[in-house]
Amino acid sequence: MRTIEELFVDENEVNKAELGAAIEPFARIGRSTSEAVFTAAGEGLSDQKRVLVALLVREAAVVATGGESGLSIPQIIAQTGAKADATRKALQRLRQRKFLEKDGALWRIRRHMVGKIREYLTAEDRRAPRNPRR
């Protein structure tokens, strides 16, 4: 049984191992750009999950090298290849799930939700997989 003190979580803390495990099946991090380089598994994800992976990659880059956390919608579109409308809808759905927060024009993951995000990413989609981008 946990003590009350053990129930508190620092919303700004991130478990690096968990963050890496969430990203690893779907993307690598570009050494020069710190952007998502999607794997074959990542290419097959829905637009919503690709948006989430791009934001996880950004968070990992911030943890590793510093810099500003979060991505703007144009940056997300550039990294994922998703259309603007699909990106906006994905961001709103992910925010409703409490995975994301918005700060001005930047969207970022809620660091204490990485475990739940990982579960979501590895869960089977209920719809047919889409064609990978080329």
Image (cartoon, rainbow, N blue to C red):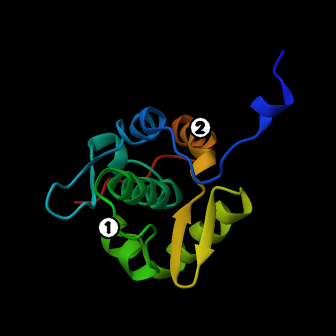
User: For mark 1, does the 10 Å Cα neighbourhood hold few (<14), some (14 to 19), or many (20 or more) residues?
Assistant: some
* Place of residue 112 in the rendered image (x, y in percent of width and height, measured from the top left): 62, 47
Kind of residue sitting beneath label 2:
Gly
Kind of residue sitting beneath label 1:
Gln
* Place of residue 63 in the rendered image (x, y in percent of width and height, measured from the top left): 38, 52
Residue identifier under label 2 = 115
In which image quadrant can residue 54 be found?
Answer: bottom left
Q: Residue at x 60, y 56 (%)?
A: 110
Q: Residue furthest top?
A: 1
Q: Residue at x 56, y 47 (%)?
A: 13
Above or below for 43 versus 107? above
User: For mark 2, does the 10 Å Cα neighbourhood hold few (<14), some (14 to 19), or many (20 or more) residues?
Assistant: some
4 or 30: nearer the viewer: 4
The answer to the question of whether label 2 and label 1 lie on touching residues, with beta carbons closer than 8 A, is no
Above or below for 103 versus 81? below
**Residue 93 falls left or right of residue 56:** right
Whichever of callouts 2 and 1 sits on the residue coming sooner in the sequence is: 1
* Place of residue 52 in the rendered image (x, y in percent of width and height, measured from the top left): 49, 56
* Place of residue 98 in the rendered image (x, y in percent of width and height, measured from the top left): 71, 57
Label 1 sits on a secondary structure element that is: helix
Q: Residue at x 52, y 45 (%)?
A: 14
On residue 79, which mark appears? 1
